[in-house]
Amino acid sequence: MTQSFSPPLVKMQSLHKSYGPAVQVLKGLDIEMKPGERVVVIGPSGGGKSTLLRVMMGLEKIDSGSITFGGKPYISATNGKTIIDTDVRRLIGMVFQHYTLFPHLNVLQNLILAPCKVRGETKASATQRAQALLDRFGLGAKAGNYPAQLSGGQKQRVAIARALMLDPKLMLFDEVTSALDPELVAEVEQVILQLAAQNMPMMIVTHDMWFAKNIASRVIFCAGGVVVEDGPPEQVLGSPKEERTKEFIDRVFHIHH
């Protein structure tokens, strides 16, 4: 069976999402993602990027449209009612801008909580996997530390390790480096590049164009709740076709240089 017949990993069709009558965030968004792709979503603030990830994670309802995952129905909305298949949702991991670690649990406890609770994994087995992940991310010695004792970069790496404990089939990253000091950004990006090397499919929202260029197999520019441009990173970031993309990229590169 050739590759072209495998269903898309994610297929979003005509997603609409508004906050009240005045604020339409997604206006008929269509995105397809193949297995193994690393899709970076860029665009102006308020363009719907973070909302898109929250919808993918089942954290926000949609007004209409549908999402399939691996060819199976995942999220759909009819008459304003959103239906989510929670079994499919468990296949998706998400890391947020602000770590969302439990402050009263140490690093190891943060990692083993969900596998033990959600999956009924034994504490011994979860602990072994958690320690292996922490070692891999250069955090082996921090297992007994509490989040308050970690740097922002370490917290973010712990948050990524925690998401990986549930063996996700897709990782979502929402501005995971934007709250970090510049010198800590590289250590988090390193971890994500490591996952990319293992073909982990991911969807990443970022303002960091250097990172976007290095990690993406595809870049999507969203503005005004729709996809304006979609293509390989060198094309979208290097020679965008659409005027709106061009203006945005000129402005972003101008700010950062």
Image (tube, helix red, strand yellow):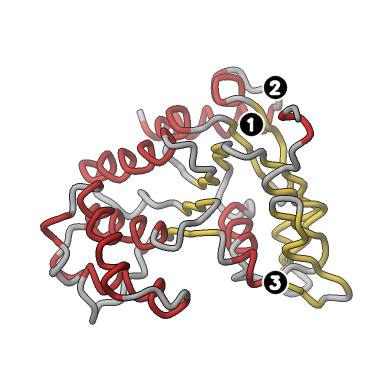
The reply, left or right, for residue 249 in relation to residue 176 is right
Residue linked to disc 1: 245
The reply, left or right, for residue 154 in relation to residue 48 is left
Residue occupying the point 60% across, 55% down: 46
Residue occupying the point 32% across, 71% down: 112
The type of residue carrying mark 2 is Lys
| Horizontal and vertical percent position of residue 117 | 42, 80
| Horizontal and vertical percent position of residue 152 | 24, 57
Helix, strand or loop under label 2: loop
Residue linked to disc 2: 241
Q: Give yes or no for contact between labels 3 and 1 (Cβ–Cβ under 8 Å).
A: no
Judging depth in this view, the residue of 9 and 46 nearest the camera is 9
Report crowding for label 3: few under 14, some 14 to 19, many 20 or more residues within 10 A (C-alpha): many
Answer above or below: position of 250 versus 13: above
| In this view, the mark in front (2 or 3) | 3
Quadrant of image for the N terminus: top right
| Horizontal and vertical percent position of residue 90 | 56, 66
Distance CA(mark 2)–CA(mark 3):
32 Å
